[in-house]
Image (cartoon, rainbow, N blue to C red):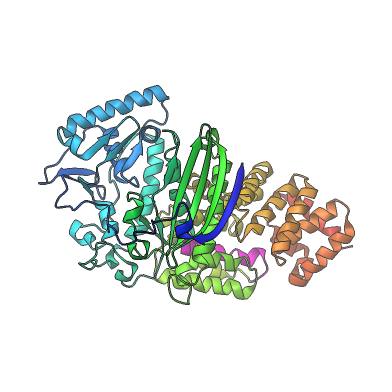
Amino acid sequence: MRQHNDIREPAAAHPDAPFPPQDRSRIRTTHQTDPAAALAKIHVLGPLTITTKDGTPLTLRNRKAQGMIALLALAPRAQRTRVWLRSKLWSESDEQKSSTSLRQTVFEIKKDLGAMTDHILQIDRQSIALRLDKVWIDLPALKNDPGLCHTLGVTRETELLEGCDVADEEFEEWLTVERQLWDDLARNLPKYRPAPAQSQVAKISDLPNIAPVYCLGFLPNIEHGCSDFTSHIADQIQETVARNLKEFQPLQVIDFRSYSDDQINLTQACEAEFFIRVRALQVRQKITLTLFLYRTSNMTYEWSQSIQMDVDELFQPDSMLMSGFISQNVERLAKSIFEDDIYPGGSDGHNRAGYTALNLMFKLDHASLMRSIDLLDQAQKGSGYSVFPSLRSYAATFALGENIGRLEDDMAEQTRILVRETLDANPFNSISLACLGHVMGYAFGDHTAAGELMTRALNLNSSQAFVWDHYALHKFYIGEYDAAYQAAKRANYLGAYSPISYTYETTLAMAATMQGRHREAIAYAKNALAKQPRFIAAMRYLIANYGHLGEIDKAKRAYEKLIAIDPDFQSELTQKERFRLTNKDAATFVIEGIRRSEY
């Protein structure tokens, strides 16, 4: 596996520049066909319905056929490969059976739609697509013009694909994610107003009373030599990167993947300050993937990140290489987008509250923690985004572990209320669930509820280092140290480029301690402290491991630094509270290592 970076050069000189230098004037404002000219209309908001131009319903009797149309209608370009469709509709069947089932379902669709089939569907040996020049779909249209919610009768209570029941676990997982994305958009529907007549693209400035959000654009991907099995990878990378970013921070995505490059004028296209695209180059069984970032304000290619791997590695369950590549790009994008004061405007930072607040918490001082809490409190007033109250709950745990406050009775009750309210909202955000799981286990000792929340978070998104880290902490606190160690290793790998990577290294040091890997634990704890010298959790385990190895002088020096920050730690009762280990043998083990530094 090889990775390399490219840093800034003029867009016009780069082989994958986002638009040709000779023509920057042409743009289509929407990929949707004019509803008045559409031969068919597909509604996915509410029950799935298909109608002709004059409103005559077209009924699909087969549930798999309904599912296929739903999958196509919500696809980035209303197109999916046959391989991808089989994986979502017949995930438990082998290739031969699923291929047969797909052909039968296409036959059922043709039978139900009749002559309309050839007008609205494009079917070939590799893929199936809706013809966007002939079909109008309500959800993409609503994204382009939020004012349509009044015309369509859509509210925040409208369910995406209501009653859609396709008996396949992969389809249900896909539907859960799509409903999460719709729920994020629907929260602000009552605040929308129709877009100005001269433009069909809704700009952030057209949405009153909504705090500015970041906007990321998708450019057409570049594919060379890709097979049926790898042609979806570029789209998958873009979508997963954006999804991971959205779990930390509200993010609007504008999708231009259905355009050709010469139809995109980035300075006029939308409010997006940044655009991304992916290039996939396959040569036999090797594939090279590159993600490019472009800044529209000064028309520059910002940076790129590449990885080369065997094609077989793409299809391994929870591929570490692919997950690591995605995580690295997420961290670099977050740094480029959320740490940049240029966009959106304003100095209060509420528009980037999630990302900023989490980083502030891990500065590990009282003032930064209070700033983080204030930022989240203010952000919640203007947004129903589920991660804000979850992070607000998570902030309370720092009062227990880092000696930067106390979890007073009123704060504890407030935290419990926040947990209940967020869970009642049925969140589909893995960061939110991991935060709540940590609060339930670490702060309140309800490890059963914590385990359920952590498992749910991982099932939703297994490429978030933050989720793996807190899953590892959960396993650690219930005494499953082997599982904790393996999860912490994964978090450390995925979060290597995170600004809070030292928290992942500390968790790994904790898990290694319980396995008797003292040298390894010391190495990770020292790495963490080199990045964040005030991280007393890392200090505690560094001291314990020095003590168990008999390196008393080193243990004493580390102990003195710890006491300077946390003088209460000299009390045995406080030591037990700081470690919060439910297993008595484990608590005795670490405190024994600490004791050796005190004499």
Residue lying at the far left of the rendered structure: 54
Query: Image quarter for residue 424?
Result: bottom left
Q: Is residue 546 magenta?
A: no
Q: 219 or 201, which is in the foreground? A: 219
Which secondary structure type mostly characterizes the magenta part of the structure? helix
Residue 435 drawn at (x, y percent): 53, 57
Q: Which residues are magenta?
A: 387-404
From the viewer's perspective, is 534 left or right of 216?
right
Residue 307 drawn at (x, y percent): 56, 45
Q: Identify the residue at image location x=76%, y=48%.
A: 520
Q: Does any portion of residue 256 appear in the rendered image?
A: no
Above or below: residue 322 compared with residue 372: above
Q: Identify the residue at image location x=75%, y=44%.
A: 515
Residue 439 drawn at (x, y percent): 56, 58
Q: Locate the N terminus and report the quarter of the image it occupies.
A: top right
Q: Locate the C terminus and report the quarter of the image it occupies.
A: bottom right
